[in-house]
Amino acid sequence: MRDFSTGFAAHVGSGATTLCWCWKLVRADGVTLGFTDHDVALSFDGVTYTPAHGLDGGETVARTGAQTQTAEVLGVLHADAITEADIAMGRYDGARVESWRVNWRDVGERHLMRADTIGEIVREDGVFRAELRSGQYALNVPKGRVYHHLCDARLGDGRCGLVLGPTGFKADAVVTAVEGGARITVSGLSGFADGWFAYGHVSWTSGARTGIEDGISVHSGAVITLDQTVADSIAVGDALTVYAGCDKQFSTCKSKFNNAVNFQGFPHIPGNDFLMRYPSEDDPMTGEGFVK
């Protein structure tokens, strides 16, 4: 049973309600948007909820136990709010959505009905359909570590411990040519060897993709190939920061980054091929470790 405030409970129990839906959307980059299915803008808690031009909340299926509850929000794309370009670039992936039931005559009488995260977003014919996943969805996300040879930390994070600042592991660059698809040419990488930034990532600091990170699959000279198509959302002159790449191997961690002490993999664990190995006269018999 929901615990409504006294004012909101009294309004619901009056039999003649003036209720509407308000949705507060907070993206991962901190941008906050407010929408309502009412025909006049409403404001509370520092957020203005603007009429959403056809935004409509679908049915919510209530489930018992720890099952994930899902709902949908259906709406029309319009340029001053949720744009198709922003959705395509993933700006709304994992965004938090609060669904409020509000008395539009007195916004002080309201209740938070759900707090969800955006899952899948489908776009077709100028309409978007956003799946809202309840908090139980976090229980379905795998946790813990997997024991394998490769490192499972991200380069530069707290577990890796490597500082990527002015140590030669990042570079400020500017797009000088867009070759189509995922290949771009940039300035600022002349002092780095080919492949130095392979398996790294870029963080866009200007242009349409500002604040978005993209992985790097190939680096050769001034040309980098990203792991997804970006040609439609970048232009010559866009600035970005390029971060060195790590292939998660112990040898790379030791030789390239001098960070073997923080390696977060298990290079000495025997693999499946260990059962099929047998001694050879060419094997070194020095007693040293196999991984150096």
Image: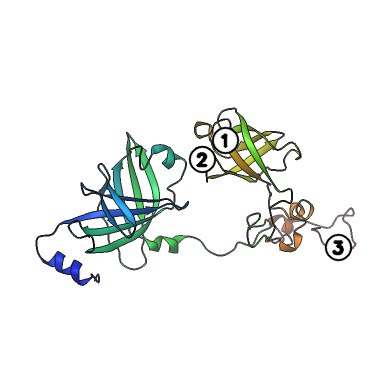
Q: Percent x, y for residue 243?
A: 66, 46
Q: Which residue is mark 2?
A: 209
**What's the distance in space between the residues labelled 3 and 1, CA to CA?**
50 Å
Secondary structure beneath label 2 = loop
Q: Percent x, y for residue 135?
A: 39, 62
Circle on res. 238 = 1
Q: Quadrant of the N terminus?
A: bottom left
Residue 15 or residue 34, whichever sits in front? 34
In the rendered structure, the answer to whether residue 291 lies left or right of residue 140 reads right
* CB under 8 Å between discs 3 and 1: no
**What's the distance in space between the residues labelled 3 and 2, CA to CA?**
49 Å
Q: Which residue is mark 3?
A: 288
The amino acid type, in three-letter code, at marker 2 is Arg
Residue 222 or residue 252, whichever sits in front? 222
Residue 119 or residue 145, whichever sits in front? 119
- For image coordinates 29% across by 45% down, the residue present is 74
Q: Residues within 10 Å of mark 2 (few under 14, many from 20)?
A: many
Q: Quadrant of the C terminus?
A: bottom right
2 or 1: tag closer to the N-terminus: 2
The amino acid type, in three-letter code, at marker 1 is Asp
Secondary structure beneath label 1 = loop
3 or 2: tag closer to the N-terminus: 2
Which one is in front in this view, the residue at disc 3 or the one at disc 1? 1
